[in-house]
Amino acid sequence: MEKALRIYGGVLRLVRRLPKDSRPYYAKYARENFVNYREVDANDAKSLQELFHRAYNHSVWVLNKYSVDPSAADKLREICFK
């Protein structure tokens, strides 16, 4: 649970790097995704890791879409892949 909250916080910090008009959409999108998957079994390491990888990959995709340096997601990568 703690790792998921750290990832969620990291995603929201990345949302702040997006253009102002797109921030509300992606903040809401991130929240909805984390809420939708809150029922995943905390003991199912494989499913959790898959969700964490997806969160990172999607974050990098959005950063690239808005021409934000993808290295901004380095801290998120550290959280997701350890």
Image (cartoon, grey):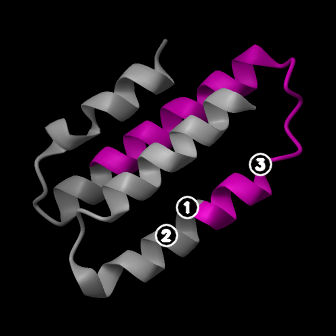
Q: Secondary structure at mark 1?
A: helix
Residue range in magenta is: 31-60
Element type at marker 3? loop
Q: Position of residue 79 (x, y in %)?
A: 46, 24
Disc 1 to disc 3, how far (Cα)?
Answer: 11 Å
Within-10-Å neighbours for mark 2: few <14, some 14–19, many 20+: some
Answer with mark 1 or mark 3, whichever residue precedes in sequence.
Answer: 1
Q: Judge whether 70 appears above or below 52 on screen.
A: below
**Coordinates of residue 27 in the picture (x, y in percent):** 49, 69
- Residue pictured at 71% horizontal, 17% vertical: 46
Q: How far from the left and from the top, in percent, is residue 80?
A: 49, 25
Secondary structure at numbered mark 2: helix
Is residue 82 within the magenta segment?
no
Q: Eyeballing the image, is 40 above or below 46?
A: below
* Crowd rating for badge 3 (residues with CA inside 10 Å; few <14, some 14–19, many 20+): few
Residue named by callout 1? 30
Residue 50 appears at what percent x and percent y? 61, 28
Q: Which residue is mark 3?
A: 37
Extreme residue toward the top, this view: 82
Characterize the magenta stretch by its predominant secondary structure. Answer: helix
* Cβ atoms at labels 1 and 2 below 8 Å apart: yes
Circle nearer the viewer, 2 or 3: 2
Q: Are marks 1 and 3 in contact (CB under 8 Å)?
A: no
Left or right, 81 with respect to 60, comes to right
Name the residue tied to disc 2.
27
Q: Name the residue rendered at 65%, 58% in the picture.
A: 33
Vertical arrangement, residue 75 with respect to residue 8, above or below? above
The amino acid type found where label 1 is placed reads Ala
Which residue in the rendered view is the most extreme toward the bottom? 21
43 left or right, relative to 60: right
Amino acid type for the residue under numbered disc 3: Tyr
